[in-house]
Image (tube, rainbow, N blue to C red):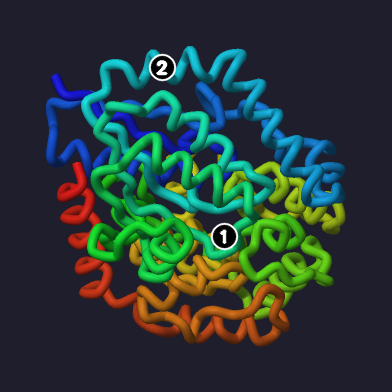
Amino acid sequence: MKKILICAVPFSDNLGDGVIAASLAHIVGLKYPQARVEFLDIAGRQGFAEENLRGGGAFRVFAKLPSLLRSLIVFLYCLKGYLSSWRRNWQAAIDDADVVVIGGGQLFCDVALNFPAKLFFLSRLLRGKKVVVASVGVTAKWSFWGQFLVKRFLDNARPVFYATRDQESADNLHTYFKVPRPQIRVVPDPALICADAFPDELSPQKSWDVGICVSSLDALVMNSEYGDANSTPSARFFSSLAETLRTQGLRVLYFTNGAAEDNRVLEEIVSAAAEPKPDFVVPRHPDELVSLISTCACVVAHRLHANIVAYGLHIPSVGMNWDKKVASFFELTGRERHLFDLSPEVEKLGSSVLDLLGEQRPDRQRLDALRSQVVAGIHALV
């Protein structure tokens, strides 16, 4: 029986990554219904709710360190994990794999060497395997060492196919890693087919007019390709937006994508709120994220996969642009007019939500075309 191993971050606390992995596995299963599809988390996690450098007070301290020191800490952390347990666990998963899929999400990015280090260590075990790169995001912001480690990953793994999730990522893969342009396909994000991957989680009822996806704006900026400073307190921004929408009589639900830094902002909002406390949900698993988004008539979010899941469920969303990958998605779906900057005036944002609620849902024909493109593209790779 064929075994297909998907290597990404399926057990990340940012549950959008889990939605990608499950959607990718669903697509692979359509072509190979008898195959075993397994996951390997390149952060060394074996399941959800495992601790990492993003959790707790350590993240706040880490974020204030000089960039070179942050990179050194991350590399040593990954080296320790690789030598102590990752190598053994990864080798066992890779040994009997017929195809290794590196894919989904912004894996080719350089935030303190996080993904470059993990991909490099993984690649040491991939020699001789059939490796494909599927629907990845590729940033244009690289340190010398980050670029060096990813080049070493490509040299070791020698992927036989490459697919990026947008044209800008394809351009970056060619520019920074010299992958020939004819070898690079553009295959949109697998999470666009989340409705098929999570059919039992979808709600037929819209219990909320607006779902507000709460995020840590400081954390987003630190991970952004733009690199602009943020001066807007996160909790104040989201609570002001919710209040503006409630004054229009709308039912508002706070939620997060599950990331620890976002959950802390939500805790701050709820703690500071007067009685009665606002409605909120903190999802702990990808199916919970898809389920709660399906209960909303509209979504407001910075997080890319809150917007992608909403679009995949045919639910309109208003996005806020903190990184080029967000802008690329709104361009792909022809919805640039629903994309604002990092922290827009809440009155303008609220007006856009009201306008969107009064309009028809996103173009179904375009969504169906993108879904078909995703399935066909992934099937061509595997």
Question: Is residue 115 among what the camera can see?
Answer: yes
Q: Nearer the viewer, residue 131 or 17?
A: 131
Position of residue 2 relative to residue 324, above or below, is above
Pinpoint residue 68: horizontal percent, then vertical percent: 78, 47
Position of residue 234 relative to residue 122, above or below, is below
Q: Nearer the viewer, residue 61 or 301?
A: 61
Secondary structure, mark 2, is helix
Quarter of image, res 249? bottom right
Mark 1–mark 2 CB contact (< 8 Å): no
Pinpoint residue 179: horizontal percent, then vertical percent: 35, 57
Pinpoint residue 277: horizontal percent, then vertical percent: 76, 53
Position of residue 262 relative to residue 338, above or below, is above
Q: Residue at x 22, y 49 (%)?
A: 378
Amino acid at pointer 1: Arg
Residue 303: numbered disc: 1
Amino acid at pointer 2: Gln
Please name the residue that numbered disc 2 is placed on.
Answer: 91
Gap in angstroms between the C-alphas marked 1 and 2: 33 Å
Q: In the rendered view, does 151 fall on the left or right side of 211?
A: left
Task: Please identify the quadrant where the N terminus is shown.
Answer: top left
Question: Is residue 198 among what the camera can see?
Answer: no
Position of residue 336 relative to residue 12, above or below, is below
> Can you tell which of label 1 and label 2 is closer to the viewer?
2
Secondary structure, mark 1, is loop
